Amino acid sequence: MADIESQIKILKDLIPKFLPGHSVDCVIFGYEDKELKVLLLNWKQMDIWALPGGFIFKDESMDDAAQRVLEERTGLSSIFLKQFHTFGKIQRSDHSQQEHHKKIMALMKPSKQDRKIVIDWFDHRFITTGYFALTDIRKATPRPDFLSEKCEWKSVSELPELIIDHAEIIQQAMHQLKIQLNYLPIGISLLPEKFTMIDLQKLYEAILGRPLERSNFQRKILKLGFLDRHEKLMSGAANKAPYLYSFNSTKYEELLEEGIGFRY
């Protein structure tokens, strides 16, 4: 990997190719250990985290820019990605953001000539468009960018300190998951190919932020008819072993078009 000095020169050359004043930020959701998680970047030499994001090339659509960010950070393509909100408050360019930019400059250590170009760019007021993705954690390979030393999954219930309005962006993405729950491929995107009924219930509970009654949940889900039942998950007594299920993709996609109709 090129050192930071080389990267700042690359960035300087790229800046004229970017669309000024606009960026994309991706809330990449995964599910593991009964917790809903998001992928975050930890900046080098700074105890602060950020959403994966980036600038938009002038000859690139916003959707393509978000897809590029998604692939660069996870190594995955062709997964569910949806634009959900544009964040354009004047307060996005507040004092805290300026402090973050100063830290970036201190980290990059650009020459005086490069510094003016890069500082002027980062000092623009940026409007960002938020996207959320639904990702199978088991298939993703988190990759930091050149400004970051870590790229890790963090529980949405225990988020670290985030830059500028990234906590708000995650909250908005969570809100969209809740209100569109019956129209999004939540289970088939976040769960493994085979799973137990309790796995599916815990996923719904993680998104809704509240417990659901077990027998009622199972009855309603099975009535919808989009699950195929398989062998039992044998880990103890046979009479207590739960059945494994998988999504019938054809039926599931048909229901998603009109809304699954699950009443929670």
Image (tube, rainbow, N blue to C red):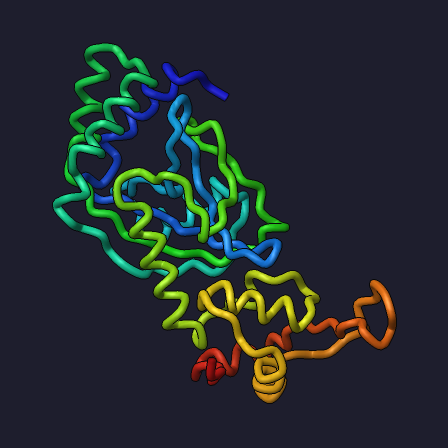
Q: Residue at x 42, y 45 (%)?
A: 159
| x and y, in percent, of residue 150 in the image | 49, 32
Q: Is residue 226 visible?
A: no
For this orientation, the residue located farthest to the top is 111
| x and y, in percent, of residue 132 in the image | 40, 56
Q: Say whether residue 83 is left or right of residue 158.
A: left
Q: Residue at x 21, y 30 (%)?
A: 122
| x and y, in percent, of residue 172 in the image | 32, 59
For this orientation, the residue located farthest to the left is 90
Whether 181 is drawn above or below 10: the answer is below
Q: Say whether residue 29 is left or right of residue 104.
A: right
**Residue sitting nearer the eye, 36 or 194:** 36
Q: Give the number of callouts.
A: 0
Tell me where residue 95 sits by quadrant.
top left
| x and y, in percent, of residue 142 in the image | 54, 40
Q: Is residue 136 visible?
A: yes
Q: Residue at x 34, y 23 (%)?
A: 10
Q: Say whether residue 68 is left or right of residue 31.
A: left
For this orientation, the residue located farthest to the right is 237
Whether 61 is drawn above or below 204: the answer is above
Q: Residue at x 60, y 75 (%)?
A: 249
Whether 21 is drawn above or below 9: the answer is below
